[in-house]
């Protein structure tokens, strides 16, 4: 078997004296969607931050494209082909849609020498606007003037402009109406079709189950389930105890 694109190896991450991630390990294969589910405060966002180098683990290692990320700054990790769609979108509200999208193409953000793996779509401004026509219609609007769903599309489009191998997505459906959650599901499906790997943190059980190839459940900083969506749907004790979900119902 080929080496996974991302391998998280027994990481232990702290905020000060607070021990958050307690020996988490997982793999993300190239072109796969791996979902992390769990209740609030269980360590999901900390996992994203640890992988991206924003809150480095004190022990363990994050290996991306065969290279240890230990001690590397977040910008260097990003330049190697990792992009993040953060919780809360975090677009630049005073910049236009165009300006937000072009930020990852700036000289400071430019990647150095990473390939596209042979089958991934290469993104430019025209390609992103074709993928998200609503953004094309609002190209000169300020980011702060967009709806929540449009801001989420902008956050995803901005990540795509970096042409990443791996996209970290933290709660992309948070605060969105059900109709817009369906759009996020469609976006996630297209990202996989375009060859991007995705590490998805999500509380919307139905969304995660619909898009993921593999699912982990985190509780109190540890992984308590590792399997396919079908296997999780059958794990009634895990669903009830750690997700508050009965059978195959919604979150």
Image (cartoon, rainbow, N blue to C red):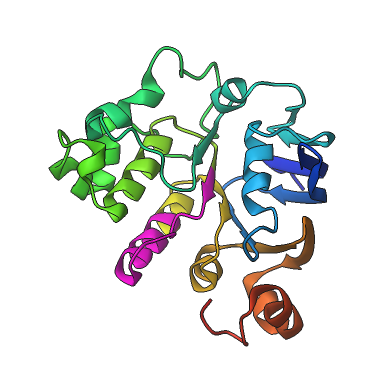
Does the stretch in magenta take in 173? yes
Asked where in the image residue 115 lies, by quadrant, the reply is: top right
- Name the residue at the front extreme: 17
Image side of residue 163 versus residue 197, left or right: left
- Could you tell me which residue is drawn at 69 percent across and 83 percent down? 234
Q: Position of residue 241 (x, y in %)?
A: 73, 79
Image side of residue 148 versus residue 25, left or right: left
Seen in the picture, residue 246 relative to 184 is either above or below; the reply is: below
Q: Position of residue 155 (x, y in %)?
A: 38, 42
Image side of residue 191 versus residue 100, left or right: right
Depth check: 205 or 219 in front? 219
Does the stretch in magenta take in 83? no
Seen in the picture, residue 144 relative to 174 is either above or below; the reply is: above
- Name the residue at the bottom extreme: 247
- Could you tell me which residue is drawn at 36 percent across and 67 percent down? 182
| Count of numbered badges drawn on the protein | 0
Segment colored magenta: 168-188
Can residue 143 be seen from the camera position used here?
yes
- Could you tell me which residue is drawn at 41 percent across and 44 percent down? 89
Q: Position of residue 50 (x, y in %)?
A: 69, 38
Q: Position of residue 224 (x, y in %)?
A: 79, 66
Asked where in the image residue 58 lies, by quadrant, the reply is: top right
Can residue 3 be seen from the camera position used here?
no
- Name the residue at the top extreme: 107
- Could you tell me which residue is drawn at 75 percent across and 83 percent down? 237
């Amino acid at each position: 078997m080929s080496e996974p694109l991302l391998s998280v190896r027994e990481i232990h991450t702290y905020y000060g004296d607070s021990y958050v991630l307690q020996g988490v390990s997982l793999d993300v294969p190239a072109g796969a969607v791996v979902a992390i589910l769990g209740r609030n405060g269980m360590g999901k966002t900390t996992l994203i931050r640890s992988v991206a180098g924003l809150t480095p683990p004190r022990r363990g290692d994050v290996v991306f494209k065969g290279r240890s990320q230990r001690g590397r700054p977040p910008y260097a990790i990003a330049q190697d082909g990792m992009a993040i769609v953060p919780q809360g979108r975090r677009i630049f509200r005073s910049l236009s849609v165009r300006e937000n999208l072009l930020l990852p193409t700036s000289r400071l953000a430019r990647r150095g020498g990473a390939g596209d793996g042979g089958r991934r779509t290469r993104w430019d401004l025209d390609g992103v606007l074709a993928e998200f026509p609503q953004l094309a219609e609002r190209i000169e609007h300020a980011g702060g003037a967009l709806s929540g769903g449009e801001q989420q599309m902008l956050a995803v489009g901005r990540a795509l402009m970096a042409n990443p191998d791996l996209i970290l997505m933290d709660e992309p459906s948070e605060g969105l109406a059900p109709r817009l959650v369906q759009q996020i599901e469609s976006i996630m499906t297209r990202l996989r079709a375009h060859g991007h790997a995705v590490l998805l943190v999500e509380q919307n059980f139905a969304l995660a189950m619909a898009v993921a190839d593999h699912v982990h459940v985190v509780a109190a900083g540890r992984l308590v389930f590792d399997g396919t969506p079908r296997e999780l749907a059958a794990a009634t004790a895990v669903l009830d105890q750690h997700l508050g979900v009965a059978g195959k119902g919604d979150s």
